[in-house]
Amino acid sequence: MKQGVVIKNVNGYFYVQTPSGDVHECKVRGRLKKERYSLLVGDTVSITNDGWIDSIEERRNSLRRPAIANIDQVIVVVAAREPDIHPLLLDRLLVMIHHSHIPPILVINKYDLHTEDTVKLKSIYENIGYTVLCTSTYTGEGIDELRYVLHGKISAFAGPSGVGKSSLLNAVDPNFAFQTGAVSDKIKRGRHTTRHASLYSLDESSFIMDTPGFSALDHTGMTVEELVHTFPEFGDHDRGCKFSPCSHSHEPICSVKEALAGGQISEQRYQSYLTIKSELEDQRRR
Ligand SMILES: Nc1nc2c(ncn2[C@@H]2O[C@H](COP(=O)(O)OP(=O)(O)OP(=O)(O)O)[C@@H](O)[C@H]2O)c(=O)[nH]1
Ligand SMILES: [Mg+2]
Ligand SMILES: [Zn+2]
């Protein structure tokens, strides 16, 4: 019996990579199929010598869309320009990742194109406590740092189409050959370059998932109280609010709004919070 990680699921076969780097084509035992959750890419499993998956280790976490287990971190990629950063989309994505209890790392790619606005955005997210890497697959800036944060972990790459996720992976490991493409070509074709949710191994202990599915995570069913906890910068301030729980919007004597007025909380982030909050309330009313 060997242990390995499920890296791919194709036509009922699961591909399991063992620490030696070998990949085994496996089938699942009937009794595992009957259990409530089915096997996911990212699961650690035990396999028999004749290619049967015998047991599944307990999961650290799992996501439904994309269907994946045991993600250690999400690398959220945006581009300094082309396409421009859309702060609300970025914050929606960060909210969902926090809600899944998976730590995010922010990568600003195409840093060769950066402007003053990029530098401002960088400092907003650094001040909240996020790790922010500035990278360029054209100049090579930041690629060593990215390789370092990926080491020993299962990482998912998320972010809008065209920001350079596949290009970054190809830069991190020249053995990768992810398909990349110009933004305009993709718009013409009307679909994403990246389509499959599988894990790619960087080395024995480091895996990567490159999928567009992450940009589409939805926050259905989240409560406003849960939303508040996905904004890390509110955490230091909410103890001083007069009302508990406080939604930090219409309530008098609110320490989050005081911190906003004092400049310790960014106006842009607070506006994202209010927008996502009203989206959640609209969903609830429907
Ligand atoms: N200026 C600049 N362009 C880059 C950089 N990295 C990638 N690009 C270009 O950006 C375009 C999109 O890159 P991809 O790697 O295909 O983007 P992606 O995020 O994987 O896109 P999807 O697979 O559609 O989600 C390509 O034309 C790349 O050549 C960079 O660091 N700087
Ligand atoms: Mg891609
Ligand atoms: Zn408050």
Image (cartoon, rainbow, N blue to C red):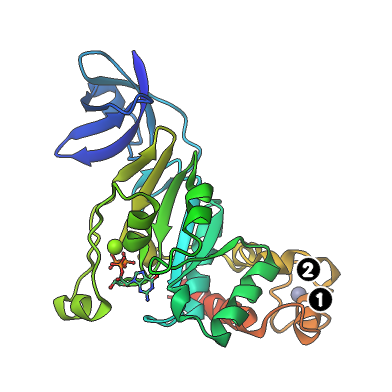
Residue 93 locus on image (x, y percent): 47, 67
Between the C-alphas of marks 2 and 1, the distance is 6 Å
Residue 156 locus on image (x, y percent): 41, 52
Q: Is mark 1 within 8 Å of ligand 3?
A: yes
Residue 98 locus on image (x, y percent): 56, 58
Nearer-the-camera pick, 216 or 142: 142
Helix, strand or loop status at disc 2: helix
Q: Is mark 2 within 8 Å of ligand 3?
A: yes
Which tag, 2 or 1, sits closer to the chain's start? Answer: 2
Nearer-the-camera pick, 44 or 169: 169
| Quadrant showing the N terminus | top left
- Image disc number at residue 255: 1
Taking the image as drawn, is residue 285 in sight? no
Q: Is residue 87 left or right of residue 267?
A: left
Q: Is residue 127 above or below residue 214?
A: below
For disc 2, the marked residue is 238
Say what amino acid the circle numbered 2 marks.
Asp
